[in-house]
C-alpha cells in the first residue's frame, strides 16, 4: 500500500459530482479545488457535462486527458462503488469519499487497497492543507498552525469555527469519517513532519488499534507538536461496565487519560476548552511548571482568579521580597504585591504600570506563567485617546513573555477591541472569561510535565506502525448470580477449562509473585478438621466459587479455634450448598491499610492496571488511578502517590508508614501478568493488606476471555527497591 502523499500535495485533482449549486457538496469541492489551480491540474467531472464555476467538465473520469492523482467524490451512496472502480482503473492513488450511506464499506476499502491506492472516508467532511493550497472541504478556513483531525466532520468544523473566533488559523484539516481504509492514527503520524502544524486538535469516538494511536501521538510528541484530544464514550470498556469492583471504580475516559499520559497528550473536556488551550500553545511560550502569578486591577477579580488557579491544581506562591518591593514603587499604598498582585488603581493612573509590573513578575524567577485579569483591553475602546498607549503596553506584555520564556495570558473584560486583537497578534493569549484562561494554563502545565520523549528535544516553534490491538473480550467464563456452585457446563468449554475460583486464582497469581496467607481447600468436615490442624488460628472461611463473598454471606472472619471454624462451616454450607470452601489463616498484622490492585483488558488499548483504596467500601470511596500495562516500579510509585488515601500509606496521625514499595511491586507484577496473558480479561486483588513488613492479598477474582492462554513468563524479577 502507498502512504498518504496523494492527500498532502497532489499534482492533480478530479472532483466527481462537481456542481455549480452552492447547496450541494459538489459545489464546495469544486470551488475549493479550483483555489489551488495555479499549483496543480484540476478536473471537474459531471455526468451531464457543461460548465461548472467557469470551467468545462468531463462526463466521466474515462474522458480525462490524464490520470488524476487524487479524486474527490460527491455522488450518491449507491453510485460510489462504481465511481471508485472507475478512478482505480484510471490509476488514481488517493480517493476522498464524502458520501454517506455506502453499502459494504469493508469491501470497497479492500478493492482500494488491492489497487495500491488509499481512501479517506466514506462519510467524511473532506480535507484541507493551507500550505499545499489543498481545499476539499465544506466551508472556508484561514491558514494557520492548528491541525484538526476529527472522526466527526461537523465537530471538526465546530473546532475550526471556535479556532477562528480565537484568531487561530488551520494548517491541516482531515475528517476521517468511517475510517474504512485510512485511519486517524495514520493521519496523525503524517502530521509529524508537517512544517506548518504546531498544535494538533484530535476528536475520536472510537480508538481502534490503541497501540498504533499511541505510537502516532508519540511521534507528534517527538516532533514538539502537542496533541489535545476530545472524546465521548471513549471505548467499549466504558459502555460495558465490568462486574468487578474495578469496573465500578473506573471509566472509559480514565483509560483514555492513561493512554494520553503514556503518549504525552492531554484530553480536553469540551471543544471550547480544547481551543482555549490551543490558543496558548500556538501563541505563547509553554509553561515549564505550575507556579502562576496573578496580576489584576481588581481585588475581587484577583481573588476569584487565585481560587480558580488553586482549584486547577496550579500553584499560587508569594513573590520574592525584592520583587514585591520593586512592584510597590509607584503603586497606591493599598496595593497588594504578594500574589495576587493588585494594582489598586495604579493601572488607571498610568497604563504603563501593567507592563512594568508584569515584566517584574516575569523576571522574578517566582513564576512559570503570568495571568493578568481585569479591565485591560477596554481603555482604548472606552477612551479612544488612550488607544495608542494601551496598544504599546500590549506589545510590552508580549516582549516580556519572549524575554523570559514564559506565557503571559490576559483575561480581559473587553470582548473584542483593538487592544485584544493586538495582544493576540503579538502572541499573548487573550480570553473573555477567567475560568477559560485558567483551564488553558492547567492543560498546558500538564503537557509540560509530560515533556518531550526522553532523549529527544522538542521542535522549535515555527511513520510509525502499530502493534496489533489486543483481542477483544469475546467470551467470558460464565458466572452465576446464584450464590451456589455453578452446574458443570454442557459440552466442551469455549475457554480453557480453568475453574477460576479463589484457590485457582491464588495459584495463578502466586506463580506471578503475589503473596497470600496460607490456605487449604475443604469439601467436607474431615478435610475441614485436617485444615484446622495444619493451619494456625484464627481462621477465615470462604466459599471458593463466589465473586463477592461478603455480599452473599460467603465469608466468615476471625474464627478463633477449630470449634468456631466447624460451626461456621456447617452454617455456611447449609445456606450455600455443597462445594469447595477455603480455610485461610487470618492476617493479624497491626497498622494494615487495605488496598485494591487490579487489571482490566480494554478492547483498544489492551490491559490497564488499577490501584486504589480497597475493602468492602471500594466503590463508595472511588479512590483509584490507572495506567496502561505493563508499568515500571517508578510508574507504580507515581500512581500510588496520586491517591487521596496516600497519606494513610505514608503514616497517618502517628501510625507507622506501611510498605508502599511492596504495593508498587504487586502493581508491577499484576501488570506484567495481564500483559503476558491475553486470556485474562480481569484480575482483581481486593483487599490487599499492606503492613509495615509487606503485603498479603486476601481475595482474588479472575475472569477470562475466549483466548488461549500463553505461558506465564511475565513475573520476572522486580527491581530491588
Image (cartoon, grey):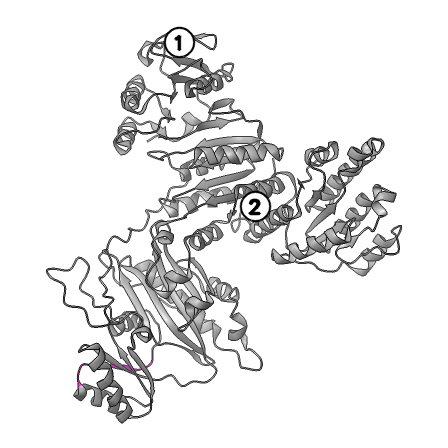
| Residue 674 in the image: above or below residue 697 | above
| Residue 77 in the image: above or below residue 636 | above
The residue singled out by tag 2 in the image is 457
Residue drawn where x is 36% and y is 70% of the image: 685
Residue situated furthest left in the rendering: 491
Q: Secondary structure at mark 1?
A: loop
Q: Secondary structure at mark 2?
A: loop
The residue singled out by tag 1 in the image is 57
Query: Pointer 1: residues within 10 angstroms few (<14), some, or many (20+)?
Result: many
Closer to the camera in the image, 596 or 387: 387
495 to the left or right of 600: left
Residue drawn where x is 49% and y is 23% of the image: 134
Report x, y in % for residue 650. 54, 75
What's drawn in magenta, residue-wise? Answer: 517-524
Does label 1 or label 2 sit earlier along the sequence? Answer: 1
The Cα atoms of the two marked residues, 1 and 2, are separated by 50 Å
642 to the left or right of 606: right
Residue 168 in view, yes or no: no
| Residue 74 in the image: above or below residue 123 | above
Residue 639 magenta-drawn?
A: no
Report x, y in % for residue 502. 27, 73
Viewer-nearest of discs 1 and 2: 1
Residue situated furthest front in the rendering: 575
Q: Quadrant of residue 607?
A: bottom left
Query: Pointer 2: residues within 10 angstroms few (<14), some, or many (20+)?
Result: few
The N terminus - image quarter: top left
Report x, y in % for residue 45. 37, 13
Amino acid at each position: 500500500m502507498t502512504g498518504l502523499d496523494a492527500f498532502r500535495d497532489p499534482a492533480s485533482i478530479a472532483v466527481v459530482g462537481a456542481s455549480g449549486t452552492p447547496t450541494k457538496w459538489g459545489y464546495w469541492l469544486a470551488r475549493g479545488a479550483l483555489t489551488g489551480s495555479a499549483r496543480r491540474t484540476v478536473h471537474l467531472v459531471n455526468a451531464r457535462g457543461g460548465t461548472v464555476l467557469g470551467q468545462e467538465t468531463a462526463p466521466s473520469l474515462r474522458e480525462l486527458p490524464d490520470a488524476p492523482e487524487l479524486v474527490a467524490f460527491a455522488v450518491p451512496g449507491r453510485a460510489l462503488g462504481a465511481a471508485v472502480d472507475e478512478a482505480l482503473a484510471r490509476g488514481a492513488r488517493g480517493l476522498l469519499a464524502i458520501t454517506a450511506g455506502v453499502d459494504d464499506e469493508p469491501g470497497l476499502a479492500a478493492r482500494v487497497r488491492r489497487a495500491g491506492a488509499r481512501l479517506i472516508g466514506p462519510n467524511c467532511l473532506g480535507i484541507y492543507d493551507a500550505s499545499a493550497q489543498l481545499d476539499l472541504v465544506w466551508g472556508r478556513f484561514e491558514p494557520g498552525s492548528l491541525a484538526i483531525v476529527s472522526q466527526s466532520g461537523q465537530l471538526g468544523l465546530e473546532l475550526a469555527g471556535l479556532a477562528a473566533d480565537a484568531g487561530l488559523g488551520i494548517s491541516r484539516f482531515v475528517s476521517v469519517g468511517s475510517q474504512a481504509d485510512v485511519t486517524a492514527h495514520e493521519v496523525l503520524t503524517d502530521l509529524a513532519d508537517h512544517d506548518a502544524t504546531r498544535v494538533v486538535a484530535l476528536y475520536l469516538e472510537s480508538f481502534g488499534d490503541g497501540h498504533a494511536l499511541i505510537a502516532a501521538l508519540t511521534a507528534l510528541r517527538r516532533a514538539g507538536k502537542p496533541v489535545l484530544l476530545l472524546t465521548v464514550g471513549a471505548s467499549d470498556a466504558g459502555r460495558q461496565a465490568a462486574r468487578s469492583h474495578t469496573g465500578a471504580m473506573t471509566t472509559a475516559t480514565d483509560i483514555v487519560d492513561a493512554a494520553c499520559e503514556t503518549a504525552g497528550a492531554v484530553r480536553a473536556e469540551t471543544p471550547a476548552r480544547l481551543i482555549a488551550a490551543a490558543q496558548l500553545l500556538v501563541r505563547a511560550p509553554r509553561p515549564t511548571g505550575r507556579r502562576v502569578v496573578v496580576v489584576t486591577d481588581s481585588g475581587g477579580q484577583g481573588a476569584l482568579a487565585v481560587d480558580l488557579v488553586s482549584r486547577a491544581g496550579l500553584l499560587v506562591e508569594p513573590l520574592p521580597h525584592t520583587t514585591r518591593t520593586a512592584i510597590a514603587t509607584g503603586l497606591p499604598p493599598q496595593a497588594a504585591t504578594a500574589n495576587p498582585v493588585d494594582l489598586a488603581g495604579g493601572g488607571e493612573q498610568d497604563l504603563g504600570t501593567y507592563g512594568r509590573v508584569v515584566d517584574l513578575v516575569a523576571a522574578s524567577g517566582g513564576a512559570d506563567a503570568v495571568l493578568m485579569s481585569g479591565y485591560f483591553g477596554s481603555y482604548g475602546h472606552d477612551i479612544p485617546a488612550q488607544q495608542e498607549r494601551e496598544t504599546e503596553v500590549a506589545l510590552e506584555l508580549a516582549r516580556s513573555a519572549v524575554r523570559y520564556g514564559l506565557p503571559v495570558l490576559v483575561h480581559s473584560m473587553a470582548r473584542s477591541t483593538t487592544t485584544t486583537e493586538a495582544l493576540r497578534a503579538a502572541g499573548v493569549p487573550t480570553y473573555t472569561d477567567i475560568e477559560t484562561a485558567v483551564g488553558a494554563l492547567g492543560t498546558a502545565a500538564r503537557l509540560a510535565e509530560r515533556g518531550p520523549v526522553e532523549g529527544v528535544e522538542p521542535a522549535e516553534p515555527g511513520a510509525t506502525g502499530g502493534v496489533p490491538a489486543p483481542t477483544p473480550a469475546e467470551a467470558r467464563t460464565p458466572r452465576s448470580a446464584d450464590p451456589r456452585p455453578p452446574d458443570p457446563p454442557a459440552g466442551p468449554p469455549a475457554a480453557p477449562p480453568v475453574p477460576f475460583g479463589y484457590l485457582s486464582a491464588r495459584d495463578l497469581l502466586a506463580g506471578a509473585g503475589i503473596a497470600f496467607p496460607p490456605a487449604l481447600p475443604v469439601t467436607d468436615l474431615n478435610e475441614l478438621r485436617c485444615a484446622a490442624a495444619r493451619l494456625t488460628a484464627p481462621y477465615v472461611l470462604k466459599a471458593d466459587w463466589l465473586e463477592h463473598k461478603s455480599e452473599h454471606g460467603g465469608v466468615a472472619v476471625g474464627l478463633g479455634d477449630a470449634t468456631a471454624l466447624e460451626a461456621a462451616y456447617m452454617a455456611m454450607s447449609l445456606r450455600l450448598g455443597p462445594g469447595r470452601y477455603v480455610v485461610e489463616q487470618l492476617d493479624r498484622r497491626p497498622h494494615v491499610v487495605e488496598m485494591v490492585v487490579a487489571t482490566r483488558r480494554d478492547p483498544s488499548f489492551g490491559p490497564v492496571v488499577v490501584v486504589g483504596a480497597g475493602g468492602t467500601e471500594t466503590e463508595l470511596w472511588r479512590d483509584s488511578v490507572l495506567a496502561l500495562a505493563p508499568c515500571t516500579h517508578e510508574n507504580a510509585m507515581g500512581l500510588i502517590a496520586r491517591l487521596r488515601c496516600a497519606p494513610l500509606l505514608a503514616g497517618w496521625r502517628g501510625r507507622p508508614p506501611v510498605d508502599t514499595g511492596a504495593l508498587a511491586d504487586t502493581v508491577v507484577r499484576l501488570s506484567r501478568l495481564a500483559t503476558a496473558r491475553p486470556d485474562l480479561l480481569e484480575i482483581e486483588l481486593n483487599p490487599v493488606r499492606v503492613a509495615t513488613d509487606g503485603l498479603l492479598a486476601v481475595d482474588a477474582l479472575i475472569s477470562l476471555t475466549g483466548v488461549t492462554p500463553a505461558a506465564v513468563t511475565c513475573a520476572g524479577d522486580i527491581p530491588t527497591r
